[in-house]
Amino acid sequence: MKLTLRIWRQAGPAEPGRMVAYEVPDASPDMSFLELLDVLNERLTLEGEEPVAFDHDCREGICGACGVVINGQAHGPRERTTTCQLHVREFNDGDVIDVEPWRSVAFGVVKDLMVDRSGLDRIIQAGGYISAPTGSAPEAHSTPVPKPIADTAFDNATCIGCGACVAACPNGSAMLFTSAKVTHLNILPQGAPERTERVLNLVEAMDAEGFGGCTNTGECTVACPKGIPMASIATLNREFLRASLSGRK
Amino acid sequence: MTFYKLGDDIADTTAPDVPIEQRWDKRRFDAKLVNPANRRRHSVIVVGTGLAGGAAGATLAEQGYHVIQFCYQDSPRRAHSIAAQGGINAAKNYRNDGDSVYRLFYDTVKGGDFRARESNVYRLAQTSTQIIDQCVAQGVPFAREYGGLLDTRSFGGVQVARTFYARGQTGQQLLIGAYQALSRQIDAGNIEMHARTEMLDLIVIDGRARGIVARDLITGQISTYLADAVVLATGGYGNVFYLSTNAKNSNASAIWRAHRRGAYFANPCYTQIHPTCIPRSGEYQGKLTLMSESLRNDGRIWVPKNPGDHRPPDQIPEDERDYYLERIYPGFGNLVPRDIASRAAKNQCDVGRGVGPGGLGVYLDFADAIRRMGEDKVREKYGNLFEMYDRITGEDPYKVPMRIYPAVHYTMGGLWVDYDLQSTIPGCFVVGEANFSDHGANRLGASALMQGLADGYFVLPPMLGNYIASNKFDKIDASHPAVVDTVNEATGRLTKLLSVNGERTVDSFHRELGEIMWDECGMARSEDGLRKALGRLPELREEFWRSVKVPGTGAQLNQSLERANRVSDFLELGELMCVDALHREESCGGHFRVESQTPDGEARRDDDRFAYAGAWEFGGTGEQPILHKEQLTFDYVHLAQRNYA
């Protein structure tokens, strides 16, 4: 297959960026999208040009490192699929494909297709945990958890922190990311003691990081490679309201 | 020609000489304590944020030490432990199926083909139950039964159901638990976290580890970080093979640099080739993807009976299929340990019964399971794995059997450590996959997560405290000559990589290295092949330094430079792996020497000559390494040929 990639090139955070077109004449349908970039980068290196910088690591769709906007869609056209798991067979011979970094006020471009997502880490640091110092845990079976609750907690805990939800949101909101963590921890019995502070602190950190507000457009759930649902945002809103009325903060 | 020199024997002197059940208690009781008020005056460097490093960093910070932690990823949540799928073992015996600490210990020593240290393995089994408690308290959403209690399943090499899991994403859930504990400590100011920062070298002063040299991957700035102790939690070295199930950036540089500074490297040839991976599809392939071993609980492995049978699988009638694992090993069937399953798949493909492109694959078929349990139940158990397979191959495993083939997955070898997890450099501790201690020559499924968390949460913290309480630490700063020398060496190396400006890319060298390692030091190893590899590898290393092309500069984000630095270390490590494989003239676990097999093709150990761990001392680049043997004694599990029939 012959493909044309128009890729965002930007040397550094303060440098201007632009789209540059590259042809890949020898793409195979069985390549992953990142392998397509690998092939291009090998060629650029030999031609003495700097290869395209992009984040990636596990290439199994679980670490959350990769993620680019492909033809305007975060992680590209296939549902519930990270960029590393997207394959060239989703495209047609002769296609021109636009490849850009996540675009959001809270995610500055580091270089080319790499962005700074450390704001998401700081949201978790603000309270996205259960305080359980090592060694202090009771016997695991002392707290049974109803299966439906455990399953919902799990579904939300599958968030990989890739930031696609933020990139897809017209407001640059991190609401889906934050709501997944609040839902995961707040519905579990182990998470109950810190339930109120957790939701208040996470929302405060989310705002402080410059992420936008949520207007329920739902673009986030479409882009989410792990299928975190809108219901999680409803849970966050409910938890936030409850906590706000509690007068604890 | 020999490729190494023989040094003195080495021994672990830290495990107390009391019955095995009491060793860990006794060791902890004998360990010196650091007054809680004094702990904040001691700083500890932790490199890596996977299960072992994340758990260690969080725990040490909770205890009051000042932790300085590093990861090369943009966030500590992305360490490759996240990709572990199947589960984590623990001797809870919730099933009442006869499990116990002793049985987990026994299974692990036997599964490791009697090449692990009994003391360490017993402690691992003891600690396993506490790990589950800890993770549940953190909110790790393990799979549960309708009654609200934890579900378990069985894994390869054992006959009890002791594996706890969170669908096919157990590693992710455990890592998120550790990451959240780590985040809590970062927020509390107890951990100074440096993401996108990679260790370049270990700083050793007066024989003790006192810091690291690291590079900020965004700015290229090279800095020194000094502390009272250094913990390496940097994972395994499977990427020596280029194609593996490791993350693309997983590397051996931290442990290899420590090795060059004096840490012995034990059993480098013990690598695990995982039987259930998605076969490769083309030359451009950058990595391989694992399909969890848990699939072998319900999937049946088969090949066509007749070599060269290219009919689609649904047109091959039942009596023309060979369910070879069930046939050869009726006792364990599809659940034999990984090394045995991998070799059996290779043997089938070698005689032309392989399926798929190039005949390098076997079927893993769920048709029976779907008939028995219904598609919904199969989806609930393995849904995400089936989806992943579909995305990568474009085939629907609910309809067509999966094709699988072995791939490099895990490395049992690593830096040599004593019972305290301390390397031969005092003050340099090594945890998780980066050390060699618990899995012998073959790791059982769901034991890597167990070991990483045991080391990080429970074993390292008291032993690190003991080291700090037992030593005095002179004040040092960046002007110390040893620090300056180490920085200059690290900087000089990068400058040299950039200045070669040759005509071959880093990846082309890495691929060639990988091919040599896979062919000669992979699933089957022979004296001739290894000698051939040892002839070629030094040439390849020299060629690398003569003709590698690294664009850009060192004072910027430069992913080619990062890779070049890692590959230069892989080239040296690959050579040591081959030397180790050549010297070990026996087959054991993942190390299969074709010269040492039983008449039916099973691995034949040679306990008289090789019941030891081979700990290698660095002899200089291009010089012969020095072998120190740690004799292994088996006082509890009796040495016997493994039998899974």
Image (spheres, rainbow, N blue to C red):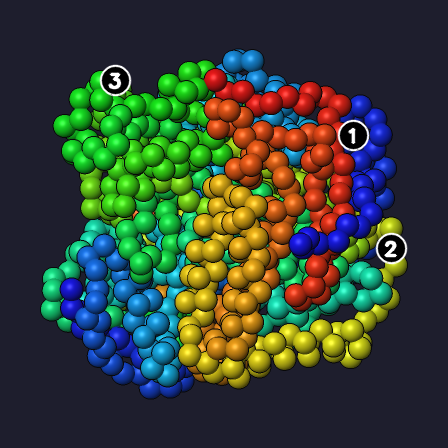
Q: Do labels 1 and 2 share a chain?
A: yes
Q: Which of marks 1 and 2 is nearer the N terminus?
A: 1
Answer with the quarter of the image where residue A106 lies: bottom left
Looking at the picture, which amino acid does disc 3 mark? Answer: Arg
> Counting other residues with Cα less than 10 Å from the Cα at mark 3, is it few (<14), some (14-19), or many (20 or more)?
few
Q: Residue at 56% x, 60% y: name it.
A: B535
- Whether tag 3 and tag 2 are in contact, CB under 8 A, the answer is no
Query: Which residue is label 3 attached to?
Result: B372
> Where's the N terminus of chain B, which quadrant?
bottom right
Q: Mark 3 lies on which chain?
A: B
Taking the spot 38% from the left edge, 54% from the top edge, the residue there is B287
What residue is drawn where x is 16% and y is 68%? A2
In front of the other: A98 or B29: A98
- Let me know if marks 3 and 2 both belong to one chain: yes
* Amino acid type at image mark 2: Asn
Q: Image point 53% across, 13% down: which residue?
A: B96
Q: Is residue B447 left or right of residue B191?
A: left
Q: Residue B573 carries which label?
A: none
Q: Earlier in the sequence, mark 3 or mark 2?
A: 3
| SS of the residue under disc 3 | helix
Asked if B405 appears above or below B125 in the picture, the reply is below
Relative placement, left or right, of B23 versus B403 is right
Residue annotated with mark 2: B471
Can residue A196 be seen in the rendering of this structure? no
Residue A214 screen position, x and y as percent: 28, 59
Q: What element carries label 2?
A: loop
* Residue at the disc numbered 1: B23
Three-letter amino acid code at the position of disc 1? Arg
Crowd rating for badge 1 (residues with CA inside 10 Å; few <14, some 14–19, many 20+): many
The one nearer the camera, B404 or A142, is: B404
